[in-house]
Image (cartoon, coloured by chain):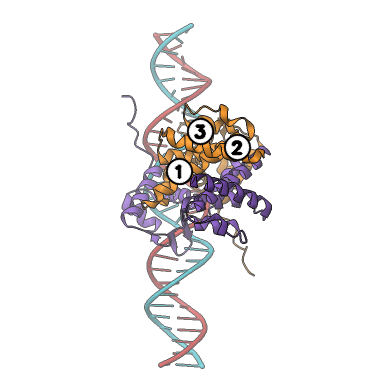
Chain colours: A purple, B orange, C red, D cyan
Amino acid sequence: MTDSLRPPSKFLAAIAQIQEMIKRDRLRPGDKIPSERELSDKLSIGRSSVREALRALELLGLIETRRGEGTFLRDFKDHQLVPLIGTFLFDGDQAKEDLHDVKAILELGCLAVLAGKADLDSIELTGSFEELTGKTGNRLLQNIWMIISNYAGRDPDHERLQKLLASARQIQYSKRQ
Amino acid sequence: MTDSLRPPSKFLAAIAQIQEMIKRDRLRPGDKIPSERELSDKLSIGRSSVREALRALELLGLIETRRGEGTFLRDFKDHQLVPLIGTFLFDGDQAKEDLHDVKAILELGCLAVLAGKADLDSIELTGSFEELTGKTGNRLLQNIWMIISNYAGRDPDHERLQKLLASARQIQYSKRQ
DNA sequence: TTGAATTGTGTGGTCTGACCACTTGAAGGA
DNA sequence: TCCTTCAAGTGGTCAGACCACACAATTCAA
């Protein structure tokens, strides 16, 4: 007997089954998922373990719980995720630079994506960058940028944006050739 | 009375205090953190709530628990995090494209960072991209790329990498002017 | 009839105590 | 010395009990 005898913890099992349920029932953000007691009953898992799973998912920002009402699927926003991870991950000062670098990378990439959709020359850099990420239609990119940006702090540095835009235009032109 | 009357949940409080303890005691990956019962005692929080916090941190890949031994700080790797998030986040087919786009963006950015450090011309695209992300020295970038890449699946598409490298070189050259 | 107050039910939030399974190391005996 | 045994500590899980809260139905007074 090597291993594989020990079944996955109820905690993980609960997460998996909850996920499956969400998928099977085609639940969308905002929808309500069964109560803790009901889940405990249906999955034959103690309420404690169900709660551990739900709390974990909540910390990930995937669900939202409202006392007296229930538990709801959440839109992947307003996550406490990264500030949290950041606390663990970043200690020194180097981290701050990393953060800004990644942010810049995402923004440059965002512009590059837009370059493939429309003419960059027509893009106005008036509002926040958030609008631009939205225009890409790439939800994942948008989400990651929001996460990073939220943690990095907003900087209305228009000069930097102009430089980014310039770089992006170069990419665009090079693709045209 | 507007609000702010309701104290943060014990669950979140536990997470916060555990974090603080880790920071205060200068705990490093591999170190052992106090047992659940001890935490429950020290923080004056029921063991259930402590467990909810620990399970959440475990799902994030921040800690590791070994039955009979204890709970240990973990290096931010091998996280189950994103396959999980992905299951929630991605439904349609559009998501797959998003994923690859973001991956490409990160890789382009990675090259751009390297362009600021060394000569891109000397970079060899032999091994996996993982090496390159490591060379940037940007842990965050590395981590995010690993997450995305892990979920997007590895593709040894050298042709695409060459194109990326070309774009990166352009950026580099434009900066030199 | 209408409106406000009450109550009931369902929900998440938390604690406690009790087991079980497992690891470790110390105590004991061969 | 070496092996066995066992006690203590740890995470894993469960059941039950409350509490705080939200909501809807009900009740009762105006």
Residue A148 at x, y percent in the picture: 58, 48
Mark 1 neighbour density, 10 Å: few (under 14) some (14–19) many (20 or more): some
Distance of mark 1 from mark 3, alpha carbons?
25 Å
Q: Secondary structure at mark 3?
A: strand
Q: Residue at x 36, y 38 (%)?
A: A8
Q: Is residue A73 left or right of residue D19?
A: left
State which quarter of the image contains the N terminus of chain A.
Answer: top left
**Discs 2, 1 touching: Cβ within 8 Å:** no
| Residue A31 vertical placement versus B121 (above, below) | below
Q: Nearer the viewer, residue D6 or A72?
A: A72
Question: In the rendered image, which residue does mark 1 sit on?
Answer: B82
Question: In the rendered image, which residue does mark 2 sit on?
Answer: B113
Tag of residue B70: 3
Q: Earlier in the sequence, mark 2 or mark 3?
A: 3
Closer to us: mark 1 or mark 3? 1
Taking the view exactly as shown, the residue that stands out farthest to the front is: A177
Q: Is residue A28 left or right of residue B36?
A: left
Asked which quadrant contains residue B116, the reply is: top right
